[in-house]
Amino acid sequence: MQSPCVARCGLNEDDYCMGCYRHIDEIVGWGNASNEAKALVWTKLKQRKADMLDGENSAILSRVKWLEAEARIKATEDGST
């Protein structure tokens, strides 16, 4: 399934990308997510966009945030959380 990425990455204060409206965890986990999980993300994007219409990119998608998201995803997959 195609990614919703529009190559305009910038995270808001809640770690949602103001380009594609995915959470950092959804962005990092996209490659390993099932088609069902990807479809679920796609269903949420229109409402997120409406909710964040006046939001701004307050942070870039940094390597540190990426690594933090990877750790959260791994912990969830391992049943550690």
Image (tube, rainbow, N blue to C red):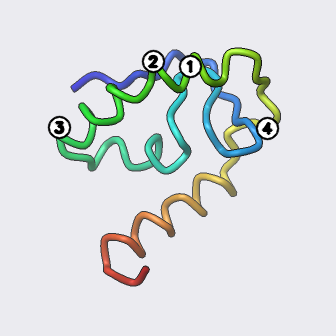
Rendering quarter of residue 37 = top left
Rendered location of residue 42, percent (x, y): 34, 26
Q: CA distance from mark 1 to mark 4?
A: 17 Å
Q: Earlier in the sequence, mark 1 or mark 3?
A: 3
Going from the N terminus, do you reach mark 2 or mark 3 first? 3
Q: CA distance from mark 2 to mark 1?
A: 5 Å
Q: Which residue is mark 1?
A: 49
Q: Secondary structure at mark 1?
A: helix
Dot 4 corresponds to which residue?
59
- Residue type at the position of mark 3: Asn
Q: Which comes before the other along the chain, label 2 or label 4?
A: 2
Q: Residue at x 76, y 23 (%)?
A: 55
Q: Earlier in the sequence, mark 4 or mark 3?
A: 3
Whether pointer 2 and pointer 1 mark residues with C-beta atoms closer than 8 Å, the reply is yes
Q: Estimate how packed mark 2 is, as few (under 14), some (14 to 19) or many (20 or more) residues with alpha carbons within 10 Å.
A: few
Mark 4 packing: few (<14 Cα in 10 Å), some, or many (20+)?
some
Where residue 45 appears, as percent x and y from the top left, is 44, 24
Mark with earlier residue (1, 4): 1
Residue 49 sits in which quadrant? top right
The kind of residue tagged 2 is Lys
Q: Which residue is mark 2?
A: 46
Amino acid type at circle 4 is: Ala
Task: Please name the residue shown 73% across and 36% down the image.
Answer: 12
Percent of width and height locating residue 60? 75, 36
Of 12 and 1, nearer the camera is 12
Give the x, y percent position of residue 40: 28, 36
The residue at which mark 3 appears reads as 35
Is residue 73 found left or right of 11 in the rendered image? left
Alpha carbons under labels 1 and 3: distance apart: 21 Å
